[in-house]
Amino acid sequence: MTEGDLENGRFAVSTWSLHRLLGAVYPYSPDPGKSGARNEPYGPGRSALTAIPRQLADRGIGRLEICSFHLPSLEPAYLAEMRATLRDADILLQTLLVEDGDPSHPETAERDVHWIAGWLEIAQALGAKNMRVIAGKQLPTAENLKRAAGHLGWLGKQADGSGVRIVTENWFDLLASPKETNWLLDTLQGRVGLNGDLGNWVAPEKYTGLCDIMRRAELCHAKADFNGSGLDSADYRKCLEACRSAGYSGPYTLIYDSTFFDDEWDGILLEKAFIEDFYPEKHSAVG
């Protein structure tokens, strides 16, 4: 497969990778005690979200993922404006990342999953192809897994006919290993897909674990670790080897979560170049 075989190329960027550039966050939450006004934990920022599609296009990247907390407004007019900037820059909105809610919680799961479902309309308005949701934050007991599966199955049904695919991620305590991740996906029988994340599990077990689950993944958060010397190339290569062994052929979302570079784009483009070098045959044609 070459990069041109995927619509808008093989690379995406999550707005999480640009949190210092964007600055402000908007803490939407199903918990009234956590939902609040704009705040600036990463400083005031230097770019509006609507400017990001053009910055992606200028760097030869054709896909974007938006974290829910980076949307400054959920009003229809703003969502239409954001969608127009994506269209004008020819950027595909790969995923809306819903960053709160716990479908596994014994007391608030029903409240949370209905709140998560409310984001489907926003994902549609933005033109997102996928909506990533949290499977659960509770410990992976049989009861908590069953509860999460029931709620995620319901959420998948709500997405029928919407044009938005619900995906979840190997993230938080509920999906702490391939055992729980595979059980959940088996139980959901394709109604919810998998966004595999290379940075959420701990080495050295994570390489075998990624090789197991990435055979089922539709999307991939390709987060590299950075240390005092820069990108941890040995770890990143092993993660990519796990993806290749699993037969993963989908897009890679570049996740930069470090202060090694002052300019976050430098870290993002370093990850992109590393993956291109790892898969030279897949990037022989540029789409």
Image (cartoon, rainbow, N blue to C red):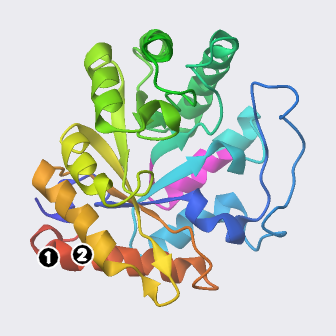
Q: In which quarter of the image is the N terminus?
A: bottom left
On residue 228, the disc is none
Query: Picture coordinates of residue 60 (x, y %)?
Result: 39, 73
The image quarter in which residue 281 lies: bottom left
On residue 280, the disc is 1
**Residue at the image point whose x is 36% and y is 24% from the top:** 192
Q: Is residue 258 above or below residue 100?
A: below
On residue 276, the disc is 2
The kind of secondary structure element at disc 1 is helix
The secondary structure that most of the magenta stretch takes on is: helix
* Amino acid type, residue under disc 2 in the picture: Glu
Which sits in the foreground, 254 or 287? Answer: 254
Tell whether 243 sits left or right of 221: left
Q: Is residue 282 above or below residue 73?
A: below
User: Is residue 287 in view?
Assistant: no
**Residue at the image point whose x is 41% and y is 56% from the top:** 202
On whether residue 92 falls in the magenta region, the answer is: yes
The kind of secondary structure element at disc 2 is helix
Which residues make up the magenta segment? 81-93
